[in-house]
Image (cartoon, rainbow, N blue to C red):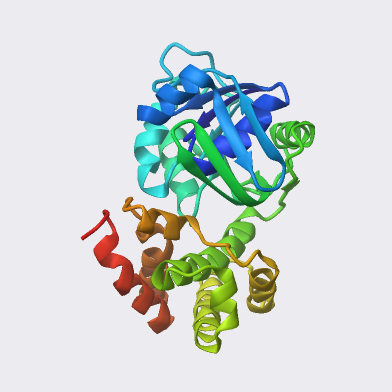
C-alpha cells in the first residue's frame, strides 16, 4: 500500500516506522532537523515494548510531484490541520483515503471541508510516543489504532488498511461508530492530559493521592455529561472504564500535553480542554473543573508565557 505519513512526530513516526518495517511503501513528511536526520540516517524507534530498530524510507518536506497515495496517515497536531490538509493535496487522488489520527473531535469535519467528505476516515490512536531527538522516536506504552468511515460503512479501503496493520503487527480494529469511538477517547484524553499537565505528575502519583484521583473523576464526570449532551453515543460506564485504564497503566504514564508543556512547545489546549469548555457553554453543561484546568494552562498555550 502506498502510504504518506503527514506528521512524522511521535504517533506518525511510530506507526509509520512499523508500516515501513513491514514492507509497505511509506513516505514520511517532516521538517527541520527531524527531516534532515531521517533523510541522513533513517527513522529510529526506541520502544519500551518491542525494542529498537531503524527504517529507511523516503522523507520529504513537500509532496509536489509525487503520485497519489492509497492512504494518508494524518498525524499532525490539531492546530496545524488546515495547513497540513492543503499540503497533502498533491497526493490526494479520487480514491485516496485520509485517516485522521489526531486528538479531539473536530479534525475530521475540518478535513472534510478542505478535501471533501469522501476522503476522510476517523481514527483514535492509543499510544504514547514522542520525538526523543531528531530522527528518533521514543515509544513508551500501547500502540493500537481504532478507525472507521465517518458514515459507519465497512469499505474496501478500510479493510485493506486493517490487513496492512495486521502485517505490520499493529493492533487495529474497524469501528462501526467512529464518532462514538472518537468521543470515548476524547473523554479520557481531556481528563488525563489535563491532570498530568496541571500537576506535572504521572499516572502513578495522580491515582494514588485521594485529592488528585478525585479531581480526575470530576473531570471525567463533566466530560461524560458533555458527551451525553452532544449525542455522541458514549455509554454511562465510561467513567469507571477510564479509571480502570488509569489504574492499569505504568506509573510513569504522562501525556503528550504534559510533554509539550514541559518542553516549552505550543499546546493542543484549545482542541482538548478549550473546545470542551466552549461546547459546555453552548450546550448548557457546567464544566467548572475543566475550566479551572483550561485557565491554569492558558498562559502556556503558545509556549512559556
Visible residue check, residue 31: no
| Rendering coords of residue 201 (x, y %) | 48, 70
In screen coordinates, is 88 left or right of 182? Answer: left
Give the mark count: 0
* Foreground of the two, 196 or 165: 196
Question: Can you say which quadrant of the picture contains the C terminus?
Answer: bottom left
Furthest-left residue in view?
305
| Rendering coords of residue 4 (x, y %) | 55, 26
Residue at 31% of width from left, 73% of height from top?
296
* Foreground of the two, 221 or 209: 209
Residue 277, compared with residue 162, is above or below; it is below
In terms of image quadrants, where is residue 209? bottom right
In screen coordinates, is 235 left or right of 132? Answer: right
* Foreground of the two, 85 or 29: 29
* Foreground of the two, 245 or 272: 245
In screen coordinates, is 257 left or right of 265? Answer: right
Residue at 73% of width from left, 26% of height from top?
22
| Rendering coords of residue 178 (x, y %) | 64, 53
| Rendering coords of residue 105 (x, y %) | 49, 57
Visible residue check, residue 296: yes
Residue at 39% of width from left, 23% of height from top?
61
Question: Can you say which quadrant of the picture contains the N terminus?
Answer: top right
Amino acid at each position: 500500500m502506498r502510504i504518506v505519513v503527514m506528521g512524522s512526530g511521535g504517533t506518525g513516526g511510530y506507526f509509520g516506522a512499523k508500516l515501513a518495517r513491514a514492507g509497505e511503501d511509506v513516505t514520511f513528511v517532516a521538517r527541520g532537523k527531524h527531516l534532515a536526520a531521517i533523510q541522513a540516517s533513517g527513522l529510529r524507534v526506541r520502544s519500551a515494548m518491542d525494542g529498537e530498530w531503524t527504517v529507511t524510507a523516503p522523507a520529504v518536506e513537500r509532496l509536489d510531484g509525487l503520485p497519489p497515495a492509497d492512504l494518508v496517515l494524518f498525524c499532525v497536531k490539531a492546530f496545524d490541520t488546515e495547513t497540513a490538509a492543503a499540503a497533502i493535496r498533491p497526493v490526494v487522488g479520487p480514491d485516496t483515503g485520509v485517516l485522521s489520527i489526531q486528538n479531539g473531535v473536530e479534525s475530521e469535519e475540518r478535513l472534510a471541508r478542505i478535501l471533501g467528505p469522501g476522503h476522510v476516515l476517523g481514527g483514535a490512536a492509543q499510544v504514547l510516543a514522542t520525538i526523543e531527538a531528531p530522527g528518533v522516536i521514543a515509544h513508551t506504552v500501547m500502540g493500537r489504532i481504532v478507525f472507521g468511515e465517518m458514515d459507519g460503512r465497512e469499505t474496501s479501503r478500510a479493510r485493506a488498511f486493517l490487513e496492512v496493520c495486521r502485517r505490520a503487527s499493529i493492533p487495529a480494529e474497524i469501528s462501526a461508530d467512529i464518532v462514538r469511538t472518537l468521543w470515548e477517547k476524547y473523554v479520557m484524553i481531556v481528563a488525563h492530559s489535563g491532570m498530568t499537565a496541571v500537576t506535572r505528575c504521572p499516572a502513578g502519583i495522580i491515582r494514588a493521592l485521594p485529592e488528585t484521583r478525585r479531581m480526575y473523576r470530576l473531570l471525567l464526570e463533566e466530560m461524560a455529561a458533555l458527551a451525553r449532551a452532544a449525542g455522541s453515543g458514549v455509554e454511562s460506564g465510561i467513567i469507571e472504564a477510564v479509571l480502570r485504564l488509569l489504574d492499569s497503566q505504568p506509573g510513569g504514564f504522562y501525556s503528550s500535553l504534559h510533554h509539550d508543556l514541559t518542553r516549552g512547545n505550543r499546546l493542543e489546549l484549545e482542541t482538548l480542554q478549550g473546545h470542551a469548555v466552549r461546547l459546555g457553554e453552548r450546550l448548557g453543561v457546567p464544566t467548572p473543573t475543566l475550566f479551572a484546568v483550561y485557565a491554569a494552562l492558558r498562559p502556556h498555550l503558545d509556549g512559556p508565557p
